[in-house]
């Protein structure tokens, strides 16, 4: 039973355009969401997070949108750059006091020059 | 320099031979965790620790043990490794889960169990 789903294994975008990576979740107890970026042969790096009390969080070129009613979040990268090419993981944590983190399977983003 | 170190970086072993992967951080972080990455399955959390002597199961704890006797170290123990534990393992630390802007990941340990 996959609680966090990234249904697109890959995404290809032209440099300068917008990249939109999507993530769906099934557990209504999730209240904190994170995005990570991972390059090959390196550990993941934290990108941006959002709490369920917000519906949007922005950090430079990266914006995360949260739609609680649809149990959906998305990461927007504008403008996309070739250096953004990586695997992006969505993750979620619930408010039950646990500090357990559940990840999606990842989306490989390729930004073409 | 703030960092998370893991050792060894690469390990080939045989089924049933106990092994330990060490993880150490120099940032006085309270929250530490272990993940495995597998093709098609993404990242999955194995165990996490909120502080010394406080550990809890993540998504895929079966076949693994951890301990947190000191704040800086969080070793991952495979008592009797099996081929399905062949994977890429990452250790991470942060002030807390909810302060992930402080989170650092180690470089990874690639394990092959024959």
Image: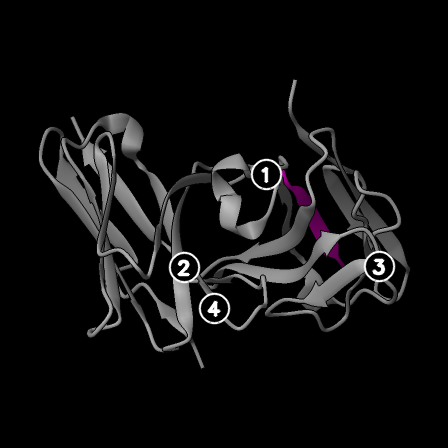
Q: CA distance from mark 1 to mark 3?
A: 27 Å
Residue found 59% across the figure and 38% down from its top: B105
Q: CA distance from mark 3 to mark 4?
A: 37 Å
Question: Which mark lies nearer to you, 1 or 4?
Answer: 4
Of the two numbered discs 2 and 3 in the rendering, the one whose residue sits closer to the viewer: 2
Residue A64 at x, y = what percent? 25, 48
The residue segment tinted magenta is B108-114
Q: Which mark is residue B88?
A: none
Judged from the image, the secondary structure of the residue bearing numbered disc 3 is loop
- Reading the image, the residue beneath label 3 is B14
Task: Report if residue B109 is visible in the image.
Answer: yes
How dense is the environment of label 3, judged by Cα within 10 Å: few (below 14), some, or many (20 and up)? Answer: some
Report in which chain the residue with disc 1 lies.
Answer: B
Q: Quadrant of the N terminus of chain B?
A: top right
Q: In the rendered view, does A78 fall on the left or right side of B90?
A: left
Query: Which type of secondary structure does the marked residue at label 1 adopt?
Result: strand
Chief secondary structure of the magenta span?
strand
Q: Residues within 10 Å of mark 4 (few under 14, many from 20)?
A: some
Q: Which mark is residue B105?
A: 1
Residue where numbered disc 2 is placed: A32
Q: Alpha carbon of mark 1 to alpha carbon of mark 4: how far?
A: 21 Å
The location of residue B33, given as percent across then percent down, is 66, 52
- Give x and y (percent) for residue B11: 77, 45
């Amino acid at each position: 039973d996959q609680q966090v789903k990234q249904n697109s294994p890959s995404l290809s975008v032209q440099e300068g355009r917008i990249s939109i990576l999507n993530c769906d979740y099934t557990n209504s107890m999730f209240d904190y969401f994170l995005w990570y970026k991972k390059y090959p042969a390196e550990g993941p790096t934290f990108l941006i997070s959002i709490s369920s009390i917000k519906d949007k969080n922005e950090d430079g070129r990266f914006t995360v949108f949260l739609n609680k009613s649809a149990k959906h979040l998305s990461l927007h990268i504008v403008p996309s750059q070739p250096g953004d090419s990586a695997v992006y993981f969505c993750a979620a944590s619930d408010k039950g006091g646990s500090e357990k983190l559940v990840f999606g399977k990842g989306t490989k983003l390729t930004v073409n020059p | 320099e703030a960092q998370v170190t893991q050792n060894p970086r690469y390990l080939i072993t045989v089924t049933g031979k106990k092994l330990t992967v060490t993880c150490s951080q120099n940032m006085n972080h309270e929250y530490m965790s272990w993940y495995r990455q597998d093709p098609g399955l993404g990242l999955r959390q194995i165990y996490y620790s909120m502080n010394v002597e406080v550990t809890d199961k993540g998504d895929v704890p079966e076949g693994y043990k951890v301990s947190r006797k000191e704040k800086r170290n969080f070793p991952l123990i495979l008592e009797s490794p099996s081929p399905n534990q062949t994977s890429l393992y990452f250790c991470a630390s942060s002030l807390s889960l909810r302060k992930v802007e402080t989170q650092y990941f180690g470089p990874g340990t690639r394990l092959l169990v024959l």
